[in-house]
Image (cartoon, grey):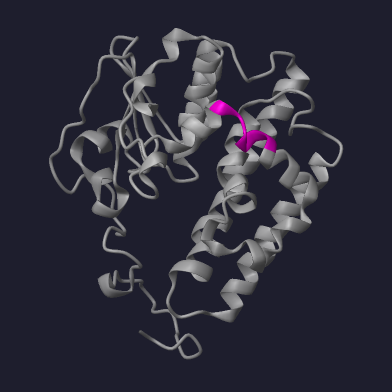
Amino acid sequence: MTDASTYTPPPVWQWDKEAGGTSTNRPIAGATHEKELPVGEHSLQLYSLATPNGIKVTVMLEELLELGIAEAEYDAYLINIGNGDQFGSGFVALNPNSKIPALADHSTSPPTRVFESASILLYLAEKFGAFLPTEPRARTECLSWLFFQMGSAPYIGGGFGHFYAFREEKIEYCINRFAMETKRLLDVLNQRLAGNRFLCGDEYTIADIANYGWYGALLVHNLYDAAEFLDVASYTHAMRWAEEIDARPAVQRGRRVNRPWGPEETQVPERHGPEDFK
């Protein structure tokens, strides 16, 4: 490993497998092995993992079911990104970007593929007419906060999370840079929620579901063991919002789906029906 203070970027970057971060990281796209995806009995087939990105979709699906929308029943299959499942041929066909979550809707012919968590939330909201305002101004506000989250996630995960929690060598500049940005983003939410119950006002929407995935993990579930370091308790309005969402029954179920770690009672590695939560 080259010392950070003496590193000079080469004229042309070359892939150094030893410096890539994890064994699954690589600079090329596409499948590494043949593996078809399983397909269950429901129209909606989800392939995911219970990361902050993954739980957005399982929470959304459980919220739709909580409303009594039977057509939102789904099968959820585990994609273990640490094992490279996202590079199987079937998953790459569903999501060429090899990232979870990915959804296939078999109610259409041919099935509709949907990838990127915000795209899936928007697809489901429009398909079932829920958690998305219809009045143009309110809809636009909702989508702005939805895409705020998509733009901010890399700073929290690939930035702060990587350098604070996962990189063995702690680099002060990198940690300071991404901790500052993470705290600024928390403050954006905190100021917004000082005068609003939810991000778009009194209505719970896909904007809340998306932002809860990451910010709920930081505020309520001590993501990266960084709650004290980031002083998350000081963001009182955001904390109130996150705790209210966290207590919703559908959210509690959604957090368990495609989760193969933690206490056994919190795990539902695969989900095919409500009986899987019992």
Q: Nearer the viewer, residue 128 or 277?
A: 277
At horizontal 56% and vertical 27% (from top left) the residue drawn is 249
Q: Is residue 21 magenta?
A: no
In percent of width and height, residue 238 lies at 74, 45
- The quadrant in which residue 194 appears is top right
* Residue 57 visible (yes or no): no
Q: Quadrant of residue 112?
A: top left
Residue 212 placement: quadrant: top right
- From the viewer's perspective, is 233 left or right of 148? right
Which residue is more in the foreground, 252 or 18? 252
- Identify the residue at horizontal 29%, vertical 69% (top origin): 15
Nearer to me, 86 or 151 = 86
> Which region is colored magenta?
244-249
Residue 247 covered by magenta stretch: yes
Which of 65 and 115 lies nearest the eye of the viewer?
Answer: 65
Q: Is residue 132 above or below residue 265?
A: above
Q: Where is the N terminus found, in terms of image quarters?
A: bottom left
Number of numbered discs present?
Answer: 0
The x, y position of residue 246, in whole percent, is 61, 37
